Image: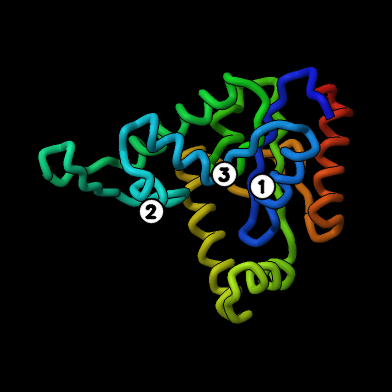
Amino acid sequence: MIMEKKIIITIGRQFGSGGLAVAKELGHRLGIPVYDSELITKAAQDSGFSVEFFEKKDEKRGWASFFSMSFNSNENYMSDGGLFKIQSETIRSIAEQGSAIIVGRCSDYILRDLDCCVDVFLTSPEDIRAERVVERARIPYDKAMEEIVKKDKVRAEYYNYFTFGNWGVASNYDLCIDSSRLGIEGTADLIIDFAKRTGLV
């Protein structure tokens, strides 16, 4: 599909709901780039900090420290707000450059003033998400359930703190989907159909 208009699709997601898989399917269908962990790399490049520094803090709250030889081997500190500002600027820069699919990292909130955005939140029942995590991470079912609870808690705290909103609440998004009902491809179909009906595709 050749995109004639600029479109930004932001995807919030519960852990294990297939957010990245849906994003990649959308990117393939629409021929536009997908940003997930790539955001970390780009934010690091733009700011001059290490990729490892951003990976450790990705979608988490809490004071961060980083060590860099370029700072005369002194330990330096940056607050959550500083990190969020850097990543927000990266997300806005990506959106300015053209169509994109951005996974997580409060992108729906950061780009809330753009009229070319479709904000999506993906969910699925816990047991289905756990099965997906078991298959993907090769860990026992009970460990997968623990990861789901932990990751969702961290993502909710991060989102709620920086957006003053509520992670996963339907009123924050244009479209909320249980990805287990339609599968990865069907969920991508639904998002594209919604975008078409709203005149964005």
Q: In the picture provided, is 37 more to the left or to the right than 99?
A: left
Instruction: Give the Cα separation between the discs numbered 2 and 3.
Output: 15 Å
Q: Which residue is mark 3?
A: 36
In front of the other: 109 or 165: 109
Identify the secondary structure beneath mark 3: loop
In the rendered structure, which amino acid carries the disc numbered 2? Lys
Quarter of the image with the N terminus is top right
The tag on residue 169 is 1
The tag on residue 13 is none
- Sequence-wise, the earlier of marks 3 and 1 is 3
Label 1 packing within 10 angstroms: few (<14), some (14-19), many (20+)? few
> Residue 131 at what x, y percent from top left?
70, 72
Residue 50 location, quadrant: top left
In the rendered structure, which amino acid carries the disc numbered 1? Val
Instruction: Give the Cα separation between the discs numbered 3 and 1.
Output: 21 Å
Mark 1 vs 2: CB contact within 8 A: no
Please report the residue visible at 66 percent of the width from the left and 47 percent of the height from the top.
169
Please report the residue visible at 81 percent of the width from the left and 25 percent of the height from the top.
2
